[in-house]
Image: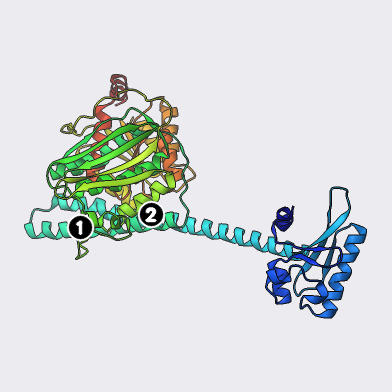
Amino acid sequence: MLGVLLSAGGEPLTLLDTGGRILVASRMFAEAVGVIGDELEGCALDGCGMAPVLAERFQGHVRRCASTGHPASVSGLLPGRTLRFAPVLDPDGRVWAVTVGARVGAEALDAARREAEEARAEAARERAAKGKFLAAASHDLRQPFQAMHLFHHLLSAKLTDSGALDMAARLGESIEAAEVLLRALLDVTKLDAGLITAELGPVPVDDVLGRLIDEFQPEADKAGLRFSVHPTGCDVVSDAALLERLLRPLIANALRFTEKGGVLIGGRHRGGSLRLEVWDTGCGIPESERDAIWNDFHQLGNPARDRRHGLGLGLAIAQRLAALLGATLSVRSRPGHGSVFAVELPLAGVARGPAPQHQPAEEEPPAQGTVLVVEDDPMQLEGIVMLLRDWGYRALPTRGLAEACREAATRLPDIIVSDLRLSGPETGVDVIRTLWSRLGLRIPGVIVTGDTDPERLRLVNAAEFRLVHKPFDPAVLRAIIARSLAALPPAMEAAAAGAA
């Protein structure tokens, strides 16, 4: 019974008998009297060291509570506190003791509650403001970087002098280093600020891997490395956009630190989980470094901080994303033989069955066809159009939905390449869907964006469009356009030919 009394109301209580003898002393009461609690138990109020006037007042309230059987709240006995005297009844309903506990006054409670609510509201406003700033900074800073990337690519293709080519290469390295740093710092800041949230649901793993194949195959081909992906044929419980962002640095590191051999991505079933693994035949990681690789800005074998070998943020971001998704991220490695990074995710439902094996990218067919470009940034619109025409495509430049509809009514495009965030109320997804409705054809669509807002990326994934992140290597866009056009069904080809 005493145990219940001492925890009543979530605060320690002092227990006195009806004659004013202390049965149990709370810490608050002992501190007020200035005596160790154990020494107070068994003492009368007027003999415990309390000032006589205060002891008499305490005794009066105890007697009153015991005689009436009603609780009472009293202020002024102890500084800054309101005390509550409450009767304790025996099984026959008689008062045999009185509890004394500190209570915060109603006004103080209301004030504290208001203060807490204001603090929560202010924190929410700060998060929202920070989120808007970072989203705007991410999008607006990526725009000029992407324009620089496009024009640098065009300029490099027209240079023949060896000295000029060398300068162009160095310029390209500088642009790439700056945009990689920008992207990584923005990602870390948003994750640490709690501005990125996961929307968990069934995610087809092979769809995520397909987008990563499109992104990294050109890099693997350029390095002369095998890049193999074994389809898993199953869904996991995750967030498609965030899972793709988690896997991206694992694959990028595997390619960066592998000089010969290749990179393999595959899955292993473990009970109710899928262990998605990224294997490489690179230099491996010493055992002494395997904990430190997850730290911000930690790099292996790069004491001079050569930016060509990365920034040391990729794995730190991957670990934060894994925690956000509730996934397990681990590594095992043999120096000189390679490494395996693994992400363990819960399975969702029943496996889909074997998916077709991914084949190495074949040589791209000759560029032919009409590409409708929707981009509201003049520099980027000009850069993309120049690239497309340089590759041999017919390019139709437009700056929004209205212009896109006019151009498409005049010449039926074979594919639509649109920025996601446009100056009007419509997104690139809205533009492509509107054109589908007006033309009566599901023309292939590619969304290009510098946006990292998971909500917007989920919008693109749900629409099942190809997604290219700014800043991007033009070779990635070229490969996606070529493959999309090569996959056009005969009915689409006939319709396009008839319209032309």
Dot label at residue 187: 2
The local crowd at label 1, few if under 14, some if 14 to 19, many if 20 or more residues have their Cα within 10 Å, is few
Q: Quadrant of residue 179?
A: bottom left
Residue 272: % across, % down: 40, 32
* Front residue of this view, candidates 449 and 113: 113
Q: Secondary structure at mark 1?
A: helix
Judge from the rendering whether residue 422 lies leftward or rightward of residue 414; answer left or right.
Answer: right
Q: Looking at this view, name the residue that lies furthest to the front.
A: 42
Seen in the picture, residue 470 relative to 446 is either above or below; the reply is: below
C-alpha distance separating marks 1 and 2: 19 Å
Q: Earlier in the sequence, mark 1 or mark 2?
A: 2
At 20% from the left and 64% from the top, the residue drawn is 303
Q: Amino acid at mark 2?
A: Asp
Q: Which residue is mark 1?
A: 308
Residue 454: image location, x then y, percent:
44, 45
Hey, what amino acid is under mark 1?
A: Arg
Residue at 85 percent of width and 79 percent of height: 53
Task: Identify which residue, 177 or 298, lies in the foreground.
Answer: 298
**Which image quadrant for residue 125?**
bottom right
In this view of the protein, which residue sits in the foreground, 222 or 245? 245
